[in-house]
Amino acid sequence: MLARADAWRVRTFSALRHPPYRRYWFSQLLSLVGSWMQATAQQYLVLELSGGSSSALGWVTVAQFMPSLLLSLFAGAVIDRLPRRRVLLTTQGVLLLTAVALAVTTHLGVVTLPLVMLIAFVSGCANAFDMPARQSMVVDFVPRSDVSNAVALNSLSFNVSRTLGQALFGVVAALGVSILAGGNADQLSRLALPFYLNVASFFVVIYTLATLPFPPREAAPHGSMLDDVREGLRYVRRTPAVRNVMLLVGLLSLTIINFNVLIPYYARVVFGAREAAFGLLSAAFGAGAMAGALWQASRPNPLRNLRLGAVILIVGAVALAVTPDATLAVPVLAVCGFGMLSLLVSANSSVQLTIPDHLRGRVMSLYSFVLVGMGPPGALISSTLISREGPLGPRYGLIALAALGAAALVLLWTRLPRQLAAPPTVPAPASTD
């Protein structure tokens, strides 16, 4: 048993044996804890400012993710042209400034819903470049044999930080009552403390990015920006293994992968939870997602759980719809998180291991487009269907979302790849950092 456990540990965390990737991974883990505290505080802030409106929560989500819908394809062409370090330092600087703006305006009590939407839009513009740049840089620090594991560990850090950050939100918000709100639990200034802590976390990742040894990357000759975008689109259209995986991710993002709307609305409106319970529900989802990422990291074939993860996600969403209270929702949300990450890690790894390197930025930007860019219309669909003022209500509305996701999975079931194809190699005369 000890030998098996040790073999599992080595296999599951194999990418961390590479020092540059290990430095990057731990810096991201710390920074993302702060980011998730901020994201959870922002969701709660929106509900406070709007009186518990799912529509307001949906529109802020639209403002945050609309830039990915508008800029992702262009961002990919930029990432394939410019040094990744320069792109990432720029995006992190912008995200740092947005965190400062949220912290100060919330602390002073001058924050408004339109201001939160504006800040969300600016941070969304930065993330439209940041997310595909991060996904495309995995291959910079690990060999091909460890790419699937590195993708899974990236998702693990994302969800370990989600679990810690969202669980810490309840504690930090309570501390904010005494530190920033003078003991008044109804003052919005109590929610500024998570924003301030996120500001501090940015300095760690900025220092790490500035000092990491980015290897040179071979690059194919470039035409115009528009030609580069078209080349990436042509590749995806002509590669069924990539195209069908992206279609599945995009359709599920439109329907059931909208837990940034579902969790806060169910917690506050359906279950009537306060900050601590809200943080616990969010953390349960993150813990399940962390387990899904760990499970996927130990699997040699990233495609193995693509269909299974989608099934678990859809069944978990239906179970959440019929869950009577917040206590029983904790394990149900853990199942939802497990299914979602099993699906997304499998999808991301299979795309990363199929595409040629000179198209990586553009293809991964298109992946971000279908995953994150579908967030705005998906948030509007979700917030409309689950609204207590809507025709279906929160519970039947969530069942309807799950049914739409199930229909998409059935349509694509036989078209999804079962084996990985080696990426084509294209000679490239130049290299960039």
Image: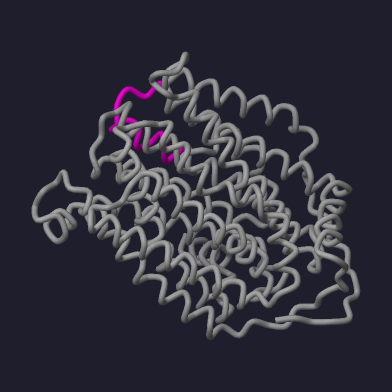
- Residue 333 in picture, x, y percent from top left: 41, 37
Looking at the picture, tell me which residue is in the foreground, 17 or 202.
202
Q: Is residue 317 left or right of residue 131?
A: left
- Residue 110 in picture, x, y percent from top left: 27, 52
At 75% from the left and 72% from the top, the residue drawn is 81
- Residue 317 in picture, x, y percent from top left: 49, 30
- Residue 165 in picture, x, y percent from top left: 35, 56
Is 121 part of what is drawn in magenta? Answer: no
Q: Quadrant of the C terminus?
A: bottom right
Looking at the picture, tell me which residue is in the foreground, 215 or 76.
76
Which segment is the magenta one?
322-335
- Give the overall secondary structure of the magenta segment: helix
Q: Is residue 315 above or below residue 183?
A: above
Q: Is residue 401 left or right of residue 241?
A: left
Is 330 part of what is drawn in magenta? Answer: yes
At 11% from the left and 57% from the top, the residue drawn is 178
Q: Is residue 189 left or right of residue 63?
A: left
Q: Is residue 250 left or right of residue 116?
A: right
Looking at the picture, tell me which residue is in the foreground, 385 or 276.
385
At 42% from the left and 76% from the top, the residue drawn is 204
How was this image coloured? one colour
At 86% from the left and 54% from the top, the residue drawn is 235
